[in-house]
Amino acid sequence: GSYNLVLVLLHPGIDAEKARTDLNKRFLDEKLGVRAVHWKQAIGPVGSMTTLIKSALFVFVSILFLVAVIIIVNTLSMAALERTPEIGMMRANGESKADIVKLIALEGFVASLLGALAGIFLVVLFNLTFLRDGFYMPPGPGITRSFKTYIDLQAAMAQEAVLLVLVAGILGSVLAVLKVLKMPISAALRQVS
């Protein structure tokens, strides 16, 4: 048979450009009629499709994240607003506005941290059970067979998720409590949940 594409894996530390140049020189000296090219150039349209799919996935994940942030902010804001009489009572008992903001921000932080850690735990658990052996994806354009895919939760991704959830939780809590703190103490005490 004949091959129209051969992939070469280089050892760590070997310069890919130098290796490609050396290979092309040897191919030319041997008059083989083949050439070594960078992998991005070799995959052509498939590489373009990969970039398109990655971009679409990024947009999709960004929209999901935005919706999640809105839900988190809304939930924690409502939790703080429902506590308006309690916040009014704290102010009537002499608590400073700064202390109340710190308390609500701390509660938002703890709730967000617990929620983020529970979410990451569920992802890891799902990966270790249902997706342990991966799952098959349908063939892409120009490919005739399906391929197995695995979900790889990386530490950096988990850290980013926790950080973003924490920011959303604290922001939602603080924004709501600042609204309540603008009310006169008497109005906050009379507020019905």
Image (cartoon, rainbow, N blue to C red):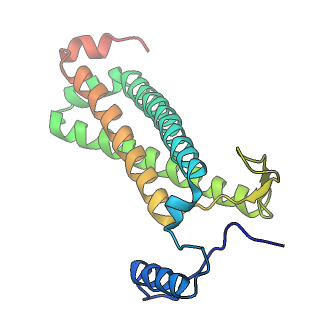
Q: Position of residue 151 (x, y in %)?
A: 66, 58
Quarter of the figure with the C terminus: top left
Q: Is residue 55 above or below residue 132?
A: above
**Along the viewing direction, whichever of 133 and 128 lies nearer the viewer:** 133
Q: Is residue 21 left or right of residue 103?
A: right
**Along the viewing direction, whichever of 15 and 152 lies nearer the viewer:** 15
The residue located at (44%, 32%) in the rendering is 66
The answer to which image quadrant residue 32 occupies is bottom right
What is the total number of numbered labels drawn onto the structure image? Answer: 0
Residue lying at the far front of the rendered structure? 31
The residue located at (77%, 48%) in the rendering is 139
Q: Position of residue 29 (x, y in %)?
A: 51, 87
Q: Position of residue 80 (x, y in %)?
A: 37, 28
The answer to which image quadrant residue 88 occupies is top left
Quarter of the figure with the N terminus: bottom right
Q: Is residue 59 above or below residue 54?
A: above
Q: Is residue 3 left or right of residue 75?
A: right
The answer to which image quadrant residue 103 occupies is top left
The residue located at (57%, 42%) in the rendering is 53
The residue located at (81%, 53%) in the rendering is 146
Q: Is residue 158 left or right of residue 92?
A: right
